[in-house]
């Protein structure tokens, strides 16, 4: 049994409790009541975790940092904390934080912030994996891990603000997220899709997605002055997304997402034709045209295209073409897979995709790299020994 001492007030003990580990310390005499105060912390997964937490509390007490007792509920704290982040986060990120803390509030919201323990949090993760979805189905492990990230950030701030002794979410283990397999099309399937989609007014958006690997929001956020036809390139400088059913126009999420992409002759040809047809639509609409003539992709009266509409149109055209159904985002994966198989350097592919590092690209498309390695062996051998 591990023991420690709070300054002048007695010792703390570590012991087994509720299939986990806990510790109790004598926190001295409480000024308001004159009674001795016992502090219990439980829910530690291992004895070592409990011992470490006890040592930290003893150290905090010795340095005047013992947290004052509070009945603040976790749900109340999370509501206040999310609102405190509103000026720091992108609207889409803030929306995801609200969804995550909403899940926590439903299950753990009435628990006091200081009584929360790692075991409670792990049980919450398990519950989310079984029935956390809106229809009573389980949430994906990746979604639960995202909730874990938000809880950990929130409780880290609670620790920084002196509301809790330690961030118990740091000791909680989220579920292991296995990267899902994504589907892609072959180059011939992409051509089949184009043959069907070429009559659709959003055809150019799908061509741009397939030949550049741009994200849906980046494609919809493109403006005509971002496209340089003479230099055969475009600049990704804004994106269109949705949060809480509201359309949001904002800069790209990361500095690497803000990038220049070179275009092939066929894509430029499609974009020129799209610009011509859009001009015709604008003339036909006359005074009912409400757009500012800046966006590449609009509806018939110049309004921006909602992301969900582009996705529905893609799915409908895929079914019409009789192709395997993939997500619109899988056009991005299709581009990357075809590019790597064609021998493009992974760094070039990474930069076109807007990944933070080439390591992300290599990890995401690791199923492609063995084939590249085999081809590389043949290419080098051919150079050495001759064809």
Image (tube, grey):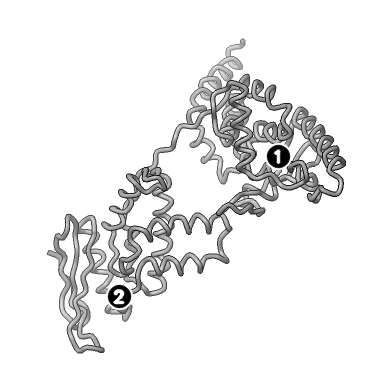
Label 2: element kind: helix
Q: Residue at x 36, y 67 (%)?
A: 74
Q: Residue at x 22, y 64 (%)?
A: 42
Q: If you read the primary sequence from the N terminus, does the residue marked by circle 1 or circle 2 appear first?
A: 2
Label ID, residue 81: none
* The image quarter in which residue 227 lies: top right
345 lies left or right of 28? right
> Viewer-proximal residue, 190 or 47?
190
Q: CA distance from mark 1 to mark 2?
A: 54 Å
In the rendered image, the vertical position of residue 232 relative to residue 100, given as above or below: above
Residue 81, x across and y down, in percent: 46, 67
Label 1: element kind: strand
Residue assigned mark 2: 60
108 lies left or right of 376? left
Residue 266, x across and y down, in percent: 76, 27
In the rendered image, the vertical position of residue 228 relative to residue 190, given as above or below: below
In the rendered image, the vertical position of residue 352 relative to residue 242, given as above or below: above
In the rendered image, the vertical position of residue 358 relative to residue 61, given as above or below: above
Q: Locate the C terminus by quadrant.
A: top right
Residue 47, x across and y down, in percent: 19, 58
> Viewer-proximal residue, 223 or 128?
128
Q: Residue at x 46, y 55 (%)?
A: 99
* The image quarter in which residue 271 lies: top right
Check disc 1: other Cα within 10 Å, few if <14, some if 14-19, many if 20+. some
232 lies left or right of 209? right
251 lies left or right of 271? left
Q: Locate the N terminus by quadrant.
A: bottom left
Between circles 1 and 2, the one closer to the viewer is 1
Residue assigned mark 1: 261
């Amino acid at each position: 049994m591990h023991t420690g001492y709070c300054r002048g007030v007695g010792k703390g003990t570590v012991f087994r409790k509720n299939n986990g580990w806990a510790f109790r310390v004598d926190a001295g005499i409480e000024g308001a009541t004159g009674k001795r105060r016992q502090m219990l912390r439980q829910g530690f997964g291992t004895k070592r975790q409990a011992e470490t937490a006890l040592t930290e509390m003893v150290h905090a007490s010795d340095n005047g940092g013992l947290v004052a007792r509070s009945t603040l509920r976790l749900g109340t704290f999370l509501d206040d904390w999310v609102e405190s982040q509103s000026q720091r986060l992108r609207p889409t990120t803030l929306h995801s934080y609200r969804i995550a803390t909403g899940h926590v509030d439903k299950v753990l919201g009435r628990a006091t912030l200081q009584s929360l323990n790692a075991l409670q949090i792990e049980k919450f993760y398990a519950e989310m994996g079984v029935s956390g979805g809106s229809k009573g189905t389980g949430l994906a492990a990746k979604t639960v891990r995202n909730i874990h990230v938000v809880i950990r950030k929130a409780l880290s701030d609670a620790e920084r603000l002196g509301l809790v002794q330690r961030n118990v979410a740091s000791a909680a283990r989220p579920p292991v997220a296995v990267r899902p397999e994504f589907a892609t099309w072959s180059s011939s399937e992409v051509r089949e899709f184009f043959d069907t989609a070429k009559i659709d007014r959003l055809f150019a958006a799908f061509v741009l997605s397939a030949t550049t690997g741009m994200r849906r929001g980046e494609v919809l956020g493109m403006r005509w002055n971002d496209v340089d036809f003479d230099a055969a390139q475009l600049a990704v400088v804004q994106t269109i997304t949705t949060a809480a059913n509201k359309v949001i126009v904002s800069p790209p999420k990361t500095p690497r997402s803000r990038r220049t992409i070179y275009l092939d002759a066929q894509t430029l040809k499609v974009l020129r034709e799209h610009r011509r047809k859009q001009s015709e639509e604008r003339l036909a609409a006359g005074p009912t045209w409400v757009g500012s003539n800046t966006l590449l992709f609009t509806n018939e009266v110049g309004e921006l295209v909602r992301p969900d509409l582009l996705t529905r149109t893609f799915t409908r055209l895929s079914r019409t073409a009789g192709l395997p159904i993939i997500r619109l985002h899988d056009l991005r994966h299709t581009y990357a897979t075809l590019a790597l198989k064609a021998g493009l350097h992974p760094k070039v592919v990474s930069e076109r995709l807007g990944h933070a590092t080439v390591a992300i690209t290599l990890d995401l498309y690791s199923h492609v790299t063995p084939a590249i390695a085999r081809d590389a062996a043949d290419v080098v051998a051919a150079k050495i020994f001759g064809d």
